[in-house]
């Protein structure tokens, strides 16, 4: 008997092999190919080979070889199919064993309207997906023949006018129904109650307000999961509406528009409710939690990112004995955790991140003894360094508590030593601390299962804890940046094969980098940052053996010697290399391989820039502040991804290649402080946003500098030898949104063009030390010179670009814009947010003439105004009293006349004020407010000025002596003034005659006398001539 059964089985097996000798069934393969052909071959690249069971979207029954699953999702989305082409019965009837059919995103290709039997030929079908099929109005065509259908997805169709419940009434086995975004009415929903087998129901995105259960209707007694996301929830009717689904265990109600108030009590009738998700409900408020103790069956409660503000109510939290997960992250809770927030003995995961909770972890956290995961990042908790509140937590594995919280020293130092019951896997405690240093937590000595440790900015004292490597062999990342560690970094004796990220930057580590075995101890390291320490020695060639290393940052140390040639060679995946601010020297290595970011600035590298740099995958290159020589290459490779280039402060020479500035994605260009010559290249076809070309020997401008497509934030051409006019360039810059223009220290000539006033986004304008002449344009006072959105500019100056060209809406990393501007008689370098708030005009050291436009008084937001060392005449405008934000006002070394407006003493921000060396007259402004701080140097060189702080008084109190009549009659004076006068004249004449006679008689004395007089005359002449030349030069541009 057994042999007979074996023979039958073998026969059936052989028969199946014969049937499937070419894979799937032949008739099914032909139908599939026919469909592919009829609908424009959309799957020609996916349906290849003889076995259709291997085709994409096709799965077969392993026993019969028939197609069991057909996924044609999006198959007909090419838009090339005629609108009257549909699937029909003949297309599907061949698939006798089909269990799952996906026709989602078919754009109406499946249409059963008018055909009640279009799917009747698939009695084995269990799953049917028809979402995004443009169904409208009446939906028919599903009858009792699909009695085995268990999963049905009709989401994202228009079923507003259909009796969906009647259409589905014959699906007696239906367990999962998705009607999301189907524009259902509350009436349609109530009729679904007839589908008594349903276990999963999705009614999301239907704008449902309420669906109150009418008396006599039965509820869905088997329903386990209900989704009500993206609807309109009426708080006053929610409890009644949910009575139709009293059996549910899982309820999703995310991202709803809540009308009225929802409380936890509205869910009290759902006695089986274990999982409640209320994420992204902006209208959910603090009232929800006041009755939280009524939901005793809950195991999971999530109210993430609801922006609930206020103090967490002191409700009956302790009644939630079954609660296992609680997520209150990304809200706006303030204050301490309530005292009743305890004894939730089943709670395994607690997420409180991104709120404003304060206080310490007291008995409430200590009572949650089942905790495995605790997240409290970005709050204001005070965390004791000893971690004693977690002494009784034997299950604790994950702690995420960085950013914003403070790590503090324990009040009772004796509690700092204890043996924990837990073995952590992740400890993240990046923090701020007001204490200079804290002891390293002693409980870490007993941890040997750590995979991730983050103590960033915790200011821990003592030497680097090398024992962490020895104790925790599973470490994948160690982040101890800015922890004040000292001592030497030592690697363990055994390999750390799981280590991926290591950041020990901003500490006080000394000694040398382990040189011989780093690749064998950390073979899978991907990220290493040892920057900003005191590490000495050379860079080991062993770094070139770290084949998975992606980022290496050794900047800001004391490393010396040359860069190993193999550091980015064959087999290396290194993309980012930072060696800035060291003592490295030698030529730059030529091999880049996959490098995208290379920072070698502020070292002592010499030689020329390797040509390979200009034909590589580099995106960011900084070679500034070295000793590089040579020319920039005229032929640049296809650097389509190059975004930032800084070559400043070297000894490069030659001209600037146009091809270089026209790189498609180049955003930041700094080649200042070199010996470059020729003209400034045209940026008409450039996408550069930040241009620094100062301190070179550039001598001219291109005829056309910029185009209307240019999106320029910074243009710095200072201290070159450019001699042309700026009128054409100003016209080109009109549409660029330029924010900072610095042209100082050149030889620009001509009038200040009116086109300058079209730069309406300008906040800093520096045209000083040039040869501009003529009047100051009145329209300059009509420009805003105001940063209306400093936060936006701060983002722009660190690389966030929002504009009109191809770089718009992107972030360019490694941009930290700076500008050098003179104000308060001192040159400052402004960066970041300070630069964003700065505004000023400097037209000093030119030959500008005419009067000062009164319109400049409209610049109420400007911080600095310098018009000194020009030939300006007329009076100081009284409108300058409107410069209420000005901190520096310099009008010295001009030819201004008249009085100083007394209203100027109302300028409360003024720190530096000078009108020295003009022709001003009258009294100085009253010494009050800021004017008390200005000394005589602010007014000197104005002979007709008087009043404090000048020594010259405007109202001298001394009076001429009066002569009484009695004095004329008094002849008893001891000196006869008449006799004195006669005697003096006779004596003077006698001496003069004696001298003349002596010179006439003695020729030697005569020659000596006249030689001496000639010397005196010539000396006086040359002295006066030299003094006049110096005075004239001081009024001209050097």
Image (spheres, rainbow, N blue to C red):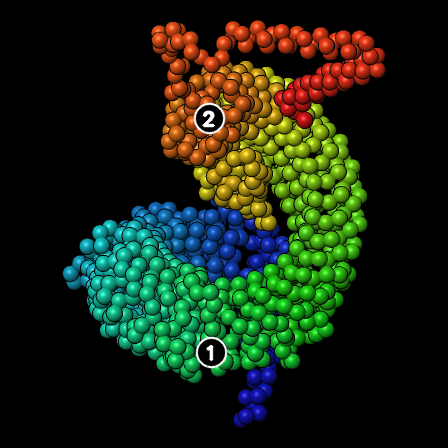
- Callout 1 environment at 10 Å: few (<14), some (14 to 19), or many (20+)? some
Q: Of the residues tagged 2 and 1, which is closer to the observer?
A: 2
Taking 290 as reference, is 998 above or below it?
A: above
- Callout 2 environment at 10 Å: few (<14), some (14 to 19), or many (20+)? few
Q: How many marks?
A: 2
Residue at far left of view: 215
State the CA–CA distance, disc 2 to disc 1.
71 Å
- Determine the secondary structure under disc 2: loop
The residue that appears at 51% across and 70% down in the rendered structure is 461
Residue at far right of view: 1004
Residue 882 x, y percent position in the rendering: 40, 26
Residue 52 x, y percent position in the rendering: 60, 64
Q: Is 966 placed left or right of 663 in the picture?
A: left
The label shown at residue 951 is 2
In the figure, residue 1028 lies in which quadrant?
top right
The residue that appears at 36% across and 73% down in the rendered structure is 411
The residue that appears at 77% across and 39% down in the rendered structure is 653
In the figure, residue 120 lies in which quadrant?
bottom left
| Residue 809 in view | no
The residue that appears at 39% across and 77% down in the rendered structure is 413
Taking 693 as reference, is 47 above or below it?
A: below
- Determine the secondary structure under disc 1: helix
Q: Is 204 placed left or right of 479 in the picture?
A: left
Looking at the image, is mark 2 or mark 1 earlier in the sequence? Answer: 1
Residue 753 x, y percent position in the rendering: 58, 20
Q: Dot 1 corresponds to which residue?
A: 442
């Amino acid at each position: 008997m057994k042999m007979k059964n074996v023979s039958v089985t073998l026969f059936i097996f052989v028969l199946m092999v014969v049937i499937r000798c070419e894979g799937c069934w032949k008739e099914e393969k032909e139908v599939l190919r026919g469909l592919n052909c009829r609908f424009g071959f959309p799957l020609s690249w996916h349906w290849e080979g003889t076995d259709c069971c291997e085709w994409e979207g096709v799965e077969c029954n392993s026993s019969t070889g028939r197609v069991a699953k057909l996924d044609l999702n999006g198959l007909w989305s090419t838009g090339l199919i005629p609108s009257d082409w549909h699937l029909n019965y003949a297309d599907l009837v061949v698939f006798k064993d089909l269990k799952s059919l996906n026709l989602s995103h078919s754009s109406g290709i499946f249409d059963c309207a008018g055909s009640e039997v279009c799917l009747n030929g698939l009695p084995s079908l269990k799953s049917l997906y028809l979402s995004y099929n443009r169904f409208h109005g009446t939906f028919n065509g599903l009858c009792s023949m699909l009695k085995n259908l268990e999963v049905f997805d009709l989401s994202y169709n228009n079923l507003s006018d259909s009796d969906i419940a009647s259409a589905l009434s014959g699906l007696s086995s239906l367990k999962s129904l998705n009607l999301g975004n189907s524009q259902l009415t509350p009436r349609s929903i109530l009729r679904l109650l007839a589908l008594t087998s349903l276990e999963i129901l999705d009614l999301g995105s239907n704008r449902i307000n309420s669906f109150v259960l009418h008396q006599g209707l039965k509820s869905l007694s088997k329903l386990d999961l209900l989704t009500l996301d993206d609807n309109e929830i009426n708080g006053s009717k929610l409890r009644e509406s949910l009575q139709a689904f009293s059996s549910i265990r899982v309820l999703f109600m995310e991202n709803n528009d809540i009308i009225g108030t929802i409380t936890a009590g509205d869910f009290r009738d759902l006695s089986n409710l274990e999982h409640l998700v209320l994420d992204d409900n902006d209208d959910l408020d603090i009232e929800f939690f006041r009755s939280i103790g009524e939901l005793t069956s809950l195991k999971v409660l999530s109210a993430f990112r609801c922006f609930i503000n206020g103090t967490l109510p002191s409700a009956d939290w302790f009644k939630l004995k079954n609660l296992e997960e609680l997520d209150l992250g990304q809200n706006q809770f303030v204050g301490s955790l309530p005292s009743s927030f305890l004894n939730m003995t089943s709670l395994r995961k607690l997420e409180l991140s991104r709120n404003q909770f304060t206080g310490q972890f007291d008995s409430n956290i200590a009572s949650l003894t089942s905790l495995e995961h605790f997240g409290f990042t970005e709050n204001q908790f005070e965390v004791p360094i000893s971690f004693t509140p977690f002494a009784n937590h034997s299950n604790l594995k994950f702690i995420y508590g960085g950013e914003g919280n403070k790590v503090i020293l324990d009040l009772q130092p004796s509690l700092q030593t204890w043996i924990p019951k837990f073995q952590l896997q992740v400890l993240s405690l990046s923090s701020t601390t007001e204490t200079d240093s804290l002891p390293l937590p002693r409980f870490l000595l007993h941890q040997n299962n750590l995979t991730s440790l983050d103590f960033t900015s915790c200011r821990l004292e003592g030497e680097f804890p090398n024992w962490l490597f020895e104790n925790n062999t599973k470490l994948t990342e160690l982040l101890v940046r800015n922890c004040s560690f000292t001592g030497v970094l030592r690697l363990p004796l055994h390999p750390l094969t799981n280590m991926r990220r290591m950041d020990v930057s901003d500490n006080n580590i000394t000694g040398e980098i382990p040189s011989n075995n780093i690749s064998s101890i950390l073979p899978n390291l991907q990220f290493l940052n040892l920057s900003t320490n005191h590490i000495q020695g050379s860079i080991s060639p062993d770094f070139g053996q770290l084949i998975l290393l992606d980022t290496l940052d050794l900047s800001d140390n004391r490393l010396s010697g040359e860069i190993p040639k193999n550091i980015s060679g064959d087999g290396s995946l290194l993309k980012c290399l930072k060696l800035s601010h060291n003592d490295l020297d030698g030529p730059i290595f030529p091999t880049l391989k996959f490098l995208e970011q290379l920072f070698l600035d502020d070292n002592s590298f010499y030689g020329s820039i390797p040509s390979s740099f200009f034909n590589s995958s580099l995106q960011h290159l900084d070679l500034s502040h070295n000793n590089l020589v040579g020319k920039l290459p005229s032929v640049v490779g296809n650097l389509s991804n190059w975004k930032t280039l800084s070559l400043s402060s070297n000894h490069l020479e030659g001209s600037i290649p146009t091809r270089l500035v026209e790189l498609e994605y180049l955003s930041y260009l700094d080649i200042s402080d070199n010996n470059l010559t020729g003209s400034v290249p045209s940026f008409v076809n450039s996408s550069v946003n930040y241009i620094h070309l100062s301190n070179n020997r550039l001598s001219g401008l291109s005829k056309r500098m910029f185009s209307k497509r240019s999106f320029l934030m910074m243009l710095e051409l200072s201290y070159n030898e450019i001699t042309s006019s700026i009128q054409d360039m100003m016209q080109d810059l009109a549409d660029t949104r330029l924010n900072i223009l610095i042209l100082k220290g050149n030889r620009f000539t001509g009038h200040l063009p009116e086109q300058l006033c079209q730069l309406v986004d300008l906040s800093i304008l520096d045209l000083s030390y040039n040869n501009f002449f003529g009047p100051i344009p009145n329209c300059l006072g009509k420009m805003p010179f105001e940063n209306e959105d400093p936060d936006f500019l701060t983002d722009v100056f660190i690389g966030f670009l929002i504009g009109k060209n191809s770089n718009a809406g992107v972030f360019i990393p490694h941009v930290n814009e700076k500008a050098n501007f003179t104000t308060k008689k001192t040159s400052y370098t402004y960066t970041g947010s300070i630069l964003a708030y700065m505004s000023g005009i400097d037209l000093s050291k030119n030959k500008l003439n005419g009067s000062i436009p009164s319109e400049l008084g409209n610049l109420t937001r400007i911080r600095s105004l310098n018009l000194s060392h020009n030939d300006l005449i007329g009076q100081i405008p009284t409108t300058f009293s409107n410069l209420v934000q000005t901190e520096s006002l310099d009008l010295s070394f001009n030819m201004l006349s008249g009085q100083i407006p007394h209203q100027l003493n109302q300028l409360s921000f003024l720190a530096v004020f000078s009108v020295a060396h003009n022709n001003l007259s009258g009294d100085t402004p009253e010494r009050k407010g800021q004017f008390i701080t200005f000394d005589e140097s602010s007014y000197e060189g104005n002979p007709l000025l008087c009043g404090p702080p000048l020594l010259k008084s405007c109202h001298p109190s001394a009076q001429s002596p009066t002569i009484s009549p009695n004095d004329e009659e008094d002849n008893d004076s001891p000196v006869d003034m008449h006799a004195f006068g006669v005697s003096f004249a006779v004596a003077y004449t006698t001496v003069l005659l004696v001298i003349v006679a002596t010179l006439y008689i003695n020729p030697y004395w005569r020659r000596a006398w006249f030689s001496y007089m000639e010397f005196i005359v010539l000396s006086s002449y040359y002295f006066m001539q030299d003094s006049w030349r110096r005075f004239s030069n001081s009024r001209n541009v050097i």
